[in-house]
Each structure stands twice: as C-alpha cells, then as structure tokens.
Image: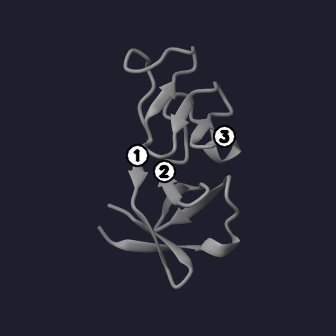
Amino acid sequence: MPWKATGVAAAAFVPGTLREVTVGGSALLLVRGAEEIRALDPYCPHAGGVLAEGTLEGSRLACPVHAAIFDTATGGVIEDPFGISPPTGGVDPLTLYPVRVVAGMVEVDLP
C-alpha cells in the first residue's frame, strides 16, 4: 500500500483530539491519543454519523448520532447504539489504517 501525506503536522495535532482529512480522494479520521496517532474510517457504519463530531474519552470514541462506541486503538465496537456489547450487536468495526510520522508530518498507508 502506498503512504500518503495528510497535510497534518504531528506537533500541531493536540492529544485527545479528532480531525477529519481527505487523503488521496478518501476521507479519513485522524485520532490523536496521548502518544500515538491513528487513522480510521471517518463515518459510523451504523448511521453514517461524522465521527470527527463524536466524543473521545481515552481510546473510546462515541458516534454523535446514535452513541455507538468504538475503540480507536483497534477500530472494534465496544457498544452498539442500543448498549449491546459485541459480538451480538449490529455495528461493524471501523477500518484502522497504518500511520507514521515523517519529517514531522503525518502519513497514512492506504490500499
């Protein structure tokens, strides 16, 4: 997979924040944890909520539409919108994309 520039400077990306970016024609959600930056699908697979508008607490990301909760470290579903824990819920996990920082800039490895 080819690495693509996001245009985001790692030093300016504050820990505990979310940022939606377009990379190579694809929308992605960047998540800045305490030590790491992750890239995920930007929209909730359940209701299409814009995850950049969601609530981030540690690695738990809540969708702003129906409150599905995702683990930003894995992309996995922690709770579906009805409070049902996986694997019995009906929400698909988010895709997690590899991230690296080169010369202070965030890059994502896309298919």
Residue matched to label 1: 95
Residue at the spot 41% in from the left edge and 30% down from the top edge = 92
Question: Which residue is nearer to you in this view: 14 or 62?
Answer: 14
Q: Position of residue 84 (x, y in %)?
A: 50, 14
Which residue sits furthest front?
A: 35
Q: Quadrant of residue 49?
A: top right
Identify which amino acid the numbered label 3 is placed on: Glu
Mark 2–mark 1 CB contact (< 8 Å): yes
Give left or right: position of 65 versus 90.
right
In what quadrant of the picture does the C terminus appear? bottom left
Residue at the spot 60% in from the left edge and 54% down from the top edge = 33
Residue at the spot 70% in from the left edge and 63% down from the top edge = 14
Residue matched to label 2: 40
Q: Position of residue 45 (x, y in %)?
A: 49, 34
Above or below, 35 relative to 67: below
Identify which amino acid the numbered label 2 is placed on: Leu
Comparing marks 3 and 2, which lies closer to the viewer? 3
Badge 2: residue crowd in 10 Å (few <14, some 14–19, many ≥20)? many
Secondary structure under the numbered disc 1 in the rendered image: loop
Residue matched to label 3: 57
Which of the two discs, 3 and 2, labels the residue nearer the N terminus?
2
Residue at the spot 67% in from the left edge and 58% down from the top edge = 15
Comparing marks 1 and 3, which lies closer to the viewer? 3
Give left or right: position of 75 versus 29.
left
- Distance from label 3 to label 2 (Cα)? 16 Å
Q: Position of residue 107 (x, y in %)?
A: 47, 72
Secondary structure under the numbered disc 2 in the rendered image: strand
